[in-house]
Amino acid sequence: MTAVGPVITSHNPADPSDVLLRIPAPGAFETVDTVERARAAQPGWLLGGAAARSAALGAVADGIDAARTELAALAVREVGKPLTEARAEVARTAAIWRYYAQAPYEPVGAVHETAAGPGLLFSRRRPHGVAGLITPWNFPFAIPSWKAAPALAAGNTVVLKPAPEATACAQRLAEIVQQAIPAGVFTVLPGGATEGNALVSAADVVSFTGSTTVGQAVARAATARGVPVQAEMGGLNAAIVLADADIGQAAAHIAASIAGYAGQKCTATSRVIAVGAALEPLREALAEALRAVTVGDPTDAATVCGPLINEHARGQVGDAGHGLCALAGGTVPDRPGWYAAPTLVEKVPAGHRLLREEVFGPIAALLPADDLAHAVRITNFVPYGLVTSVHTADLNTALSGLDRLDTGMIRVNAPSTGVDFHLPFGGAKASSHGPREQGRAALEFYTSSRTYTLSPAGAT
């Protein structure tokens, strides 16, 4: 049968002629019907008890472990993730499910003394119902998992709408999850904006990761309905390098954060701020480190910078660097696929898009700062505030500047990329809306607190 509506198509970004799937989008009505089926399944999932939920999430972790080679290869093929990073993501995905498998046994409230007289006064956290999850393509297994696992552990059911570019990964993840849990508890709904809007209009709690423009629209729509919402959006992350830093180590960390997975991470470094005398040695060391980055076939374990997700994304990188002074990169490799060389530019004019917008590619601007206070002002002078890395040998200096940074995460002598799934994740300003993700913070987001007062019959 020929599809008459919109079609979801997923290409291999390293070989655009390789089409993984082409399926019809389900539409708004089917999206709402899917939410209703999930809502019908939710009471049974909750009443099954902590032991059943814990065992199910543990079984999902085992299933991911068993399929790790296949899953890594699928991520390489569908979203162009370099093989080494794809393997690491799959391992982290299993660890996420295993971490939250213990969550159903955690306390969900507290008992208090009554103000006067006999009785019982206590608080208790309960699931919202159906969690509507909208996820991006760049971490096709980990991001859906760090949203779905805590939602399920708390007793919600889940409807996941992945980015179209990661549909095959999401469907394979669903097959593994659905082997361990009852029907209707976890559903993947392919689609685009129509399905995403319908999901936001019907779910009982909404979690989104993606672009700032879409995330803000999701937050407004969910807030208007009065349902809890979190949105993780863009980043314009800075790496601050002080003169006393180990320049070689800093350059290696920053190069990895610029070029790893072609810069397609919300935590990637896009501004490098050299303080004082750090500028000259860092300019040379970082340019050399970026020129040494292996750009190539993502199926090769040695590759660091693979293709961008599509032709438009590659064009964005080229447009952002056009006419600027390139210290490294600034070229398009002569090979099939959507590749761009890791690029470092300097002398970027004030107000240039690289200093105000997230490009989401392997390009960064090198900026000078007079001192740490100046570097902090430069870092904060953008709409975003996700993560900042600070490179210095002086802990006192680092501590004096940390609390002045308007970012949700600060990493000292470490790349801006990389997160710990057992700690809260999120940013400030336009980078995030609502409560944090991951760790125990996620369990709180997917539940609401209720206060109970129990008084004896006949008490006065």
Image (cartoon, grey):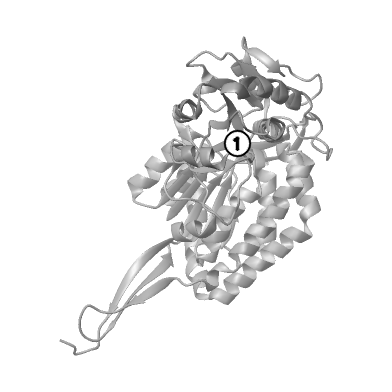
Q: Name which residue lies at 68% across and 22% down.
A: 281
Query: Which of the two residues, 449 or 111, is positioned nearer the viewer here?
Result: 111
Q: Point out residue 6 in the picture as x, y percentages from the top left corner.
A: 58, 35
Q: Determine the residue positioned at 73% across, 26% down.
A: 290
Q: Residue at x 28, y 77 (%)?
A: 453
Toward the top, the furthest residue is 323
Q: How many marks?
A: 1
**Can you say which quadrant of the picture contains the N terminus?**
top right
Q: Nearer the viewer, residue 225 or 145?
A: 145
Q: Is residue 58 visible?
A: yes
Image side of residue 146 versus residue 308, left or right:
left
Above-or-below relation of 342 to 265: above
Residue 375, position in %: x, y? 50, 27
Taking 172 as reference, is 221 above or below it?
above
Q: Which residue is more in the foreground, 407 or 194?
A: 407
Q: Is residue 348 above or below residue 209?
A: above
Residue 115 % position (x, y): 22, 77
- For this orientation, the residue located farthest to the left is 460
Q: Secondary structure at mark 1?
A: loop
> Which quadrant would residue 181 be assigned to in this image?
bottom right
The answer to whether any part of residue 5 appears in the image is no
Residue 424, how many percent across, how many down? 51, 52
Q: Amino acid at mark 1?
A: Thr
* 397, 300: nearer the viewer: 397
Which residue in the structure is indicated by mark 1? 392
| Mark 1 nearby-residue class (10 Å; few <14, some 14–19, many ≥20) | some
Name the image quarter holding the C terminus: bottom left
Q: Is residue 378 left or right of residue 328?
A: left
Which quadrant of the structure image shows residue 429?
Answer: top left
